[in-house]
Image: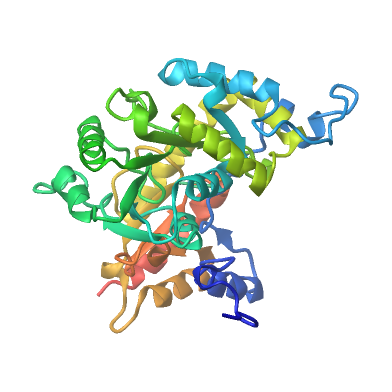
Amino acid sequence: MPRFPSSSPSASTLSDSVFSQLVAKARALPGPIHPLHVGDTYREPLAAAQAEAQRTADHPRLHNYAPVQGEPALLDAIEERLATRGGPVDRETIQVTCGATSGVSVWAAGLLDPGDEVVILAPFWPLVRGIVAGRGARAIELPFWDRLGDPGFDVEAAIEGAVGARTVAIYVNSPNNPTGRVMPDDALAARARVAARHDLWVLDDETYDDLDYRDARSTPPWARADLRDRTVAAHTLSKTFGLAGARVGFLHGPPAAMRTLRGVQAFQTYCAPRPMQLGAARALREGDAWLAEARSAYAEAGRRAAAVVGVAPPEGGTFLFFDASPHLREGEDVMGLLDRCLEAGVLLTPGAASGSAYARWVRLCYTSVPPRELDDALDRLSRVLRGSGR
Ligand SMILES: Cc1ncc(COP(=O)(O)O)c(C=O)c1O
């Protein structure tokens, strides 16, 4: 059947910005607006990892294609990093991608077919739902992170209840964007049991693994005996090393799946930008002190922000998520509240971007502006929240 002038129905739900309304309005307002809506950092990356530190004199053919799997220097650095985090990983099973967005897209294109279902633990990173939908698959949103730890919330029963005859995978992101929660070991085991019972793939989104603020980190899912055979892990240097614009990340997982995903990678972006892969290798090799500083500055910022919005301090990541119901005026919805925040100089994200059960919630990123600017933003936000209670 002809389609012109329509575009693909599975792509028609996608948009370049889930916050466009507010961003456009922010641009029209006078005065500084604190951008706490987007997951970014105020920190410059490690000097050796920056774009201007990669030179043709040091790397002949710097601007040529890299191998599809990834630049050898970066693969070396990834191998070393994974070995110290969860144990050795076969180099052949690593695939460099253009950040985790592309990593998740490659995963979806390689392991999902139209009509498949993916259980997504909600609230979630706003783009994952669209990536699944863009593949013609269905995202089954399971309210999870805000319930984790509630007495009576049974992780295994909840995940089991979301699995249907067409389910092929579970998507989990821990530390979680947007709640800042980390999945405890018993929940990992419960997730593994459900996945094994129904023969499901697990997409383990490790974007914030190195931004875990707890004293002791658990074994990552991809290294656990009960999960590793069915888990593809997606990593990125965007958050941990402040290299979001570099577009470098990587996937790893079981050999057969990774062979397929390498094929998909070749047909999507072919390779990640070679200069930035070389910078990313330097970040992984030499960036531990940078990362430790970032982790402690972010954890402190997270504690300050959590006190203002009235939630527990984050266990990891760069976001907080809070139920805005007590702050809504009579008849007001969250967009009304976010409008008032914007008038006060603070741009935030509506919770609905992270799941359809979260229309009354709000997401805040506490790492996108430097500490002094964050303090100003939090003062302004606090005045709005205190002034609008019912
Ligand atoms: C959970 C999660 N996954 C993936 C991504 C995408 O990261 P990248 O910049 O590497 O594409 C983000 C970015 O915010 C994220 O929060």
Judge left or right: residue 1 versus residue 73: left
In this view, the residue in front, 260 or 129, is 260
Q: Is residue 55 above or below residue 90?
A: below
Q: Is residue 251 visible?
A: no
The quarter of the image holding the N terminus is bottom right
Residue 339: percent from left, percent from top: 47, 75
How many marks are shown on the rendered structure?
A: 0
Q: Residue visible at 51% across and 73% down?
A: 9
In this view, the residue in front, 383 or 63, is 63
In this view, the residue in front, 223 or 135, is 135
Residue 305: percent from left, percent from top: 40, 49
Single out the residue that lies furthest toward the front.
1
Q: Residue visible at 26% across and 56% down?
A: 143
Q: Is residue 164 above or below residue 283?
A: below
The quarter of the image holding the C terminus is bottom left
Judge left or right: residue 182 versus residue 239: left
Q: Is residue 71 above or below residue 386?
A: above
